[in-house]
Image (cartoon, helix red, strand yellow):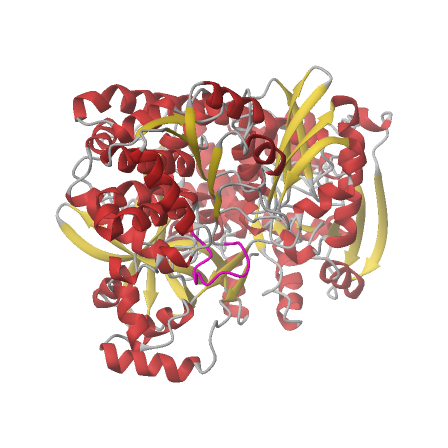
Amino acid sequence: MAIYEMCAPLLENTETIAMLLQFDLNISEVTARLLVNRGVSSPAEARAFLNPSLDQLHDPFDLKGMAEAVHRIRQAINKKEKIVIYGDYDADGITSSSVLSLYLSSLGAITEIYIPSRQDEGYGIHLEALRSILENGAGLVITVDCGISAIEEVNEIQPLLDIIITDHHTPGNVLPNAYAVINPKIPGQAYPFKDLAGVGVTAKLVQALGGTEGLQPYLDIVAIGTIADIVPLIGENRVFASLGLKQINENPRPGISALLQVLELTGQPIDSAKVSFIIGPCLNAPGRMTTFHSGYNLLTSKSIEQALPSAIELAEQNRLRRETESLILESALKMIPNQVDLAHQRVIVVAGEGWHPGVIGIVASRIAEQYTRPAIVMSIDGDQAVGSARSIKGFHLYNAISHCSKLLTKFGGHEMAAGLSIKTADIDKFRSKICAYADEVLEDEALIPHYIYDGQLKPEQISANLLKEIEMLAPFGCGNPVPRFLLPSAVVENSRIIGKNANHLKLALSLGQRSWDAVGFGMAECEKDLQQGCRVSLLTSLKRNEWMGISSTQFQIHSMKRVYEGPRDLEELLGCFHSKFFDVFFHYFMYNYNDVLLDDSKTCDSSANDGQCSIETVLISLDEALDCLGSSMIGTAVFVNTFEAAAGLLLELLDRNLLDKFPVHYHQPNPANGLGRSTVILIPDLSVYKDNLYHTVLTPVFEEGFSPAGKKFIKCLNGKRYCFKLNNNMELKNILSSSFTMNRDLLGVIYKWLRKIVPGRNIWTDNRQLLQHCRDSSGTPINGFQLSLALEVFKELGFINMESGNQYIKILCNKNPVSRQLDESRLINYHRRWLAQYGISN
């Protein structure tokens, strides 16, 4: 399961400061603590945080080089020198170029733009480009969002061409010998804010040239670049983002209006999330796929009509980027099991022919996020390959790649991201070397998803007024994340899957005396492990839900865990065990897995090991099994296929306080817990089981060879397998005879009960309610497997019709069914064959 951590305090005396803010600003205790968590230490700072304004901007002349730059730019304008703005092809670079070009043009400057091609030239200043600019008559070059590392290029051209560098990337020990270098990260200057984006540094240059009045008209562009570059939205960045978003919503410039129109966002409130996930990617897409021109043309257009072609082009380029990214991601995910030993290798290195170099970085980010592992995606072109890498917290990517530098032709980057070039023939060696390095430095815990939250939320603190106060903290982003709260124990009143693609989860939660709605986007997978009345711990944020003109407060779920504090919680979990068993059993029957899995003469597909199953089985005690599970957070799975074994094992885990450390799931592990997370899996579904995630599998000894898939189950397991003995004596035949058999008498009892049901009372909310009704009305101690089997047999033979959907099951008995023999049921015959493997007959 994921790891939840409360954010570390940035200040001392947090309790005192929070209390002071609460009473001075007349805000809730929760909001006061949120401000303290964001480094606010006084009422004055809190008022500034909640009310950003231009007078909060620092003096731009505190930046080294600013006075010299302003003097030289004014000189160039007065002398009518051509000024070339040398930018970058990403959203930060495009917005920086646009702001400076628009402002200098308003002063009467003669300006041109030069932005290198990502594919042909790559990032940064290039000597050939500078020579071309010089030959075309430029007298001054101003870089934006680049140049701080161009030592050789600037030194060679500077005697012939004046260069002003504005950049925000970390400088080296030596600076370029330019006319002026402006960068808030240069050590030894009085400027107090270091985290400006490239467009933020450009904004400071405009402020120095024309004051805040000169900067005001361009705040919308500055906001887009600042948010898109994922710099911390605090300090001056918060001022730029907040005021710029206000300008976009109230009076957007023609280019932004055109883009919103094309994206069908006109009239909708534009916040930092829409900039990050919709507008920013549109500006980034052309630089990745073709050229920067459409983004620059859009932002500098003078009318909506002029901007519309560029807006359409941006949207189309972004569509192509998403399509290309999706195809590469799909291809990479298919290749990973063949190229990476996920049970033993902690870095994912995947390579493919002809993948677009402009999007492999995004694909690497997706894989790193999905697998919670460092990911390196390489595009192969003949005997050469280029790669883009993304990391996770706890693994310094640049250091790791440096360790493999002898295998690389070129590399660069930092802790969380890097790029590299390599000979195709060396990719396998590189994979082995970087994985060996990861084995030495990467801890198990780093491979588990971590979630940071601001604090626990008590039921009595939840209100619409609290949501209003939280919304005052916007814009949210890096450095000022959407507040997240821990709900340590909530009762699930009901759950259902929603969404066009049935991939979202909606819950009704009981908290204190109230019920609240909660939505988990992309969390439909979690629904199989929830039952009405179970308790969960959730990491959430408060959101406003607008529907049919009605506004309500609801939770957005980011992560969720089952809570096990006593035997009752285990009863809730295991109450549907036999029904869940039937789900897998029936799945094999319906999709023809049974022909292979019931044939014990067939062996596992072991082409990778010369036809021999690589199973090593060792008999161990329960204590040894639990020690094995507890020794590693990654790579161990416990497979349990009987209710009796599940109940015994889970009680042992509960008594030893291990259930809060290891997740328990039906059928398959939840990827949200981390790839290969050590897990207890109840009734594993082999049709979706990935045997390369675990190096060790534990199973109860008496379950030898037993599963919904038949004895073939054991032959499908690779790696080391341990069989452990539970403390109580259990025999598989006794369990099968009592829980999984079916006979004519039992079928008759169930059918008579169905015939007696009054129309209108033949609808149930779920299998558990249906089962309880059957038990109570028929007086028969039937379990979920037996009832589900009977219903499917009746349906197959034409005795009943069944409908099911979100939160309902409906059964109708046919009034005049045709007489049928039980042997005509394929399902009954399959069930008989399945039991016969274990020496049981109906």
* Quarter of the figure with residue 85: top left
Q: Range of the magenta residues?
A: 185-196
What is the x, y in percent for residue 780?
47, 54
Q: Is residue 517 above or below residue 50?
A: above
Q: Is residue 317 above or below residue 520?
A: above
Q: Is residue 805 visible?
A: no
Q: Residue at x 58, y 65 (%)?
A: 660
| Horizontal side of residue 193 vs 149, given as left or right | left
| Horizontal side of residue 634 vs 71, given as left or right | right
* Quarter of the figure with residue 155: top right
Q: Which residue of the protein is positioned furthest toward the left in this rendering?
A: 549
Image quadrant holding the N terminus, namely bottom right
Q: Magenta residues: mostly which secondary structure?
A: loop
Image quadrant holding the C terminus, namely top right
Nearer the observer, 10 or 827? 10
| Horizontal side of residue 727 vs 194, given as left or right | right
Nearer the observer, 315 or 336? 315
What is the x, y in percent for residue 247?
20, 46
**Total marks drawn?**
0
Q: Residue at x 45, y 50 (%)?
A: 65
What is the x, y in percent for residue 470?
29, 63
What is the x, y in percent for residue 606?
80, 27
Q: Is residue 441 above or below residue 654?
A: above
Is residue 34 rendered magenta in the image? no
Q: Which residue of the protein is positioned furthest toward the top in this rendering?
A: 382
Q: Is residue 32 visible?
A: yes
Q: Residue at x 67, y 53 (%)?
A: 678
Nearer the observer, 483 or 186? 186
